[in-house]
Image: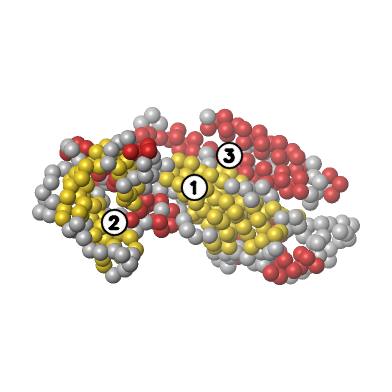
Amino acid sequence: ILTNELNLQQTVIHQASQALNCCTDEEHGKGSQVEAEAERLLLIATERREALKAELDHLKGEGPAGHKKAPMGSKAAEHTSASASKGSITLQELRLPLKADFVCSTANKPDSTKHSFFIMIRAGAENTVATPLASTHTGISGDTLTFTTKFTISDVSSDFEIDIEVYCLVQKRELFPDKKKKPNKSKAITPKRFLAITKTAQTPVMASPGGPSAVRTSNFVLVGSHKLTLSSIGKNQFPLEKIMYEANERELLSGMFHTKVPFLCPLEGHIYLKMQCEVGSKVEERGFLTMFEDVSGFGAWHRRWCVLSGYCISYWTYPDDEKRKSPNGRINLANCTSKKVEPANREFCARPNTFELITVRPQRDDDKETLVSQCRNTMCVTKNWLSADTKEERNLWMRKLNQILVDLRMWQPDSCYRPL
């Protein structure tokens, strides 16, 4: 499969290169949107081919015994009772704000130099996607370039890393093609001359990243990037940083622009996006549990039909009530402060096969302290004791509850209480 995809990207590289070779002047598409789109396709195909080739070489290097080379994950799993389930990440509403002075100059000179941008999103060799083009002539909404495409990456683990890369192409209109430029005797490296060097400097001995059949490489330049991780969830503004300059460019700049967008780039220096995650686990369980409740100041055990679904335990008196009645009550696992669900301490609860679940919620005016609930500061703390019929059933419920707690705290830390 990887080889077929590799060949497909090579075909795209060849076709895009041939199309760009035809863009010799304005009459034949030089400086047009078609040329920018061909440059974009060429870069995307080249980057995908490089990622696939690296993945293929990695798999070949592992050989038939490759699965034996990753014992670290298995060892970690032995010491962890439950690992977080995989989920899906959705990125949408991507925006690139522009510098205010650039927006003003563009409004005054609509026929000036055109900057075209697109964003590449990487999450492994097989998950590389890109936005459509947005140019400073047609894609500006106020002072921002907006990308309306929505991307969803499925089956990712909680230690995911998604690279956001912003690329720029500068297209200048040649208003006076016959007018010769005056020679510039100064050899100082100015920002304008630096951009010219990055575009024209070619090393003929280097192999093209596009492969042996590629005629050329893309003129799009990486102007900023950011790495998204689980800690990025809940944020919407990220700095563009870590620009990967080539060796000759890095030597000329002496580290000036290594941590932010280039000086002449019209971008303000941040990217805005909306990032959402959804846990892929579908943990469910049904069965009878006996619950400890406070009845008029006396402790009593009541047998309930309990259903674990989503992030709640709902309970009824009889199994048939599940389909025709609202539940007698619910235990929201997002409110759980237990580090993990464990068997109840026999010093306080002598009933066998009982496990304990502590939950909290904001205190209400009518709250009173009972055998199961206590008011602390502004919170109401409830100690839930649930007893299964057998030890095996108790362990099954605890294992599934702990899986949900791990998923909640890993993927949605802002929506649940921290364990105490």
Instruction: Tell me if label 3 and label 1 are in contact, CB under 8 Å.
Output: no
Q: Which residue is mark 3?
A: 49
Looking at the figure, which quarter contains the C terminus? Answer: bottom left
Q: Is residue 313 left or right of residue 171?
A: left
**In the rendered view, would you say 107 is above or below 10?**
below
* Residue underneath mark 2: 359
Secondary structure state at the residue bearing disc 2: strand
Q: List the residue tagged with mark 1.
A: 89
Residue 250 rendering spot, x and y as whole percentages: 58, 61
Q: Nearer the viewer, mark 3 or mark 2?
A: 2
Say whether marks 1 and 2 touch (CB < 8 Å). Answer: no
Q: Is residue 159 left or right of residue 90?
A: left
Foreground of the two, 180 or 158: 158
Total count of labels = 3
Instruction: Determine if residue 355 is in view.
Output: no
Q: Position of residue 179 (x, y in %)?
A: 88, 60
**Spatial CA span between label 3 and label 1:** 24 Å
Residue 94 is drawn in which quadrant? bottom right
Q: Is residue 320 among the parts visible in the rendering? A: yes
